[in-house]
């Protein structure tokens, strides 16, 4: 009797049930399928896992790169500083910098963020960080940053603006166009684009976690070093599903021993609600603005 009743109800509402399943797949199927694993001392981890806040990705401007689908990242505010083992080095590019930003644009970025009533606007991380930079630049100089891009950035196939945007979005692909861009700036996102344009100085993971960042620095990070390396060399981004994030550095977080333990950042609301830790990402890049 029960089975007969169930069959009648299911037959009656089957189309609606099927529609709900399809809609659910569309709404919740945008998260990265890449699993996050971390080799770490169990005693060094917090038992609480922080689920990233759900966001609506604005992909139209970014060629559907899906760079801010991050999965789950654990939180342990007491973790001591551990420098990344990232092999990337900028000894040939970096120069000592202070902690106080001398860049008017960087100062304006931080000023605008702190004064904003909408610090977590959602959207795509790249679009948000780029709009914050562009707004500050225009407020300082009175025009778009694209007007001041150097001509040498242009290539046979791309204008200076296109090169800037390709580097900014880490728009890697397997075609010759991506590989025609300077390798040292590929995969570094906003940091690479601005450094190549002569508007800032690159800072690698060692510099970042030793206190070299200036407030208002723009940052690009990658959860997995393997992803970063493939993006640099050229890869089908849609198939790789790279795991990265773009944001702005606000300040360092210190423990009671005056040691750096985290970064306070500004993004679209994905991780800005808590400090970033050294273990959150394997590859860290930033640019201290000089404009």
Image: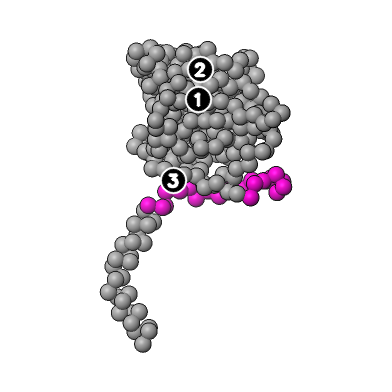
Residues under numbered marks 2 and 1 in contact, where contact means CB atoms less than 8 Å apart: yes
Q: Position of residue 43 (x, y in %)?
A: 72, 47
Q: Position of residue 24 (x, y in %)?
A: 37, 57
Please give the residue where the numbered disc 2 appears in the rendered image. Answer: 289
Which numbered disc, 1 or 3, marks the residue closer to the eye?
Answer: 3
Per the model, the C-alpha gap separating discs 3 and 2 is: 31 Å
Residues under numbered marks 1 and 3 in contact, where contact means CB atoms less than 8 Å apart: no
Q: Position of residue 168 (x, y in %)?
A: 45, 27
Please tell me the numbered disc located at residue 218.
Answer: 1
Mark 3 Cα-neighbour bin, 10 Å: few <14, some 14–19, many ≥20: few
Q: Residue at x 53, y 21 (%)?
A: 215
* Earlier-in-chain disc, 2 versus 1: 1
Q: Is residue 23 visible?
A: yes
Q: Residue furthest bottom?
A: 1
Residues under numbered marks 3 and 2 in contact, where contact means CB atoms less than 8 Å apart: no
Residue 30 is covered by the magenta coloring: yes
Q: Nearer the viewer, residue 168 or 216?
A: 216
Picture quarter containing residue 74? top right
Element at badge 1? Answer: strand
Q: Nearer the viewer, residue 178 or 129?
A: 129
Q: Position of residue 37 (x, y in %)?
A: 61, 48
Magenta range is: 27-47
Element at badge 3? Answer: loop
Please give the residue where the numbered disc 3 appears in the rendered image. Answer: 54
* Earlier-in-chain disc, 1 versus 3: 3
Which numbered disc, 3 or 2, marks the residue closer to the eye?
Answer: 3
């Amino acid at each position: 009797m029960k089975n007969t009743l169930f069959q009648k109800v299911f037959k009656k509402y089957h189309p609606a049930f099927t529609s709900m399943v399809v809609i659910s797949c569309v709404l919740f199927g945008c998260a990265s399928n890449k699993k996050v694993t971390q080799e770490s001392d169990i005693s060094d981890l917090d038992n609480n896992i922080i689920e990233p806040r759900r966001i609506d990705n604005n992909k139209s401007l970014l060629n559907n790169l899906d760079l801010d689908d991050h999965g789950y990242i654990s939180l342990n505010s007491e973790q001591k500083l551990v420098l990344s083992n990232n092999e990337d080095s900028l000894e040939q590019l970096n120069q000592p910098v202070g902690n106080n930003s001398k860049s008017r644009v960087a100062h304006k970025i931080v000023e605008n963020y702190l004064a904003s009533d909408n610090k977590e606007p959602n959207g795509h991380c790249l679009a948000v960080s780029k709009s914050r930079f562009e707004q500050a630049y225009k407020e300082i100089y009175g025009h778009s940053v694209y007007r001041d891009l150097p001509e040498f950035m242009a290539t046979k196939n791309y204008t200076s603006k296109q090169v800037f945007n390709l580097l900014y979005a880490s728009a890697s692909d397997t075609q010759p166009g991506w590989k025609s861009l300077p390798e040292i700036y590929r995969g570094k996102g906003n940091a690479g684009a601005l450094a190549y344009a002569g508007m800032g100085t690159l800072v690698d993971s060692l510099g970042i976690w030793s206190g070299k960042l200036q407030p208002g620095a723009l940052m690009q990070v990658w959860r997995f070093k393997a992803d970063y390396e493939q993006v640099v060399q050229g890869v089908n981004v849609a198939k790789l599903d790279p795991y990265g994030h773009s944001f702005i550095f606000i300040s360092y977080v210190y423990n009671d021993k005056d040691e750096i333990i985290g970064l306070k950042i500004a993004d679209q609301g994905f991780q800005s609600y808590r400090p970033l830790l050294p273990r959150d990402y394997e590859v860290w890049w930033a640019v201290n603005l000089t404009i």
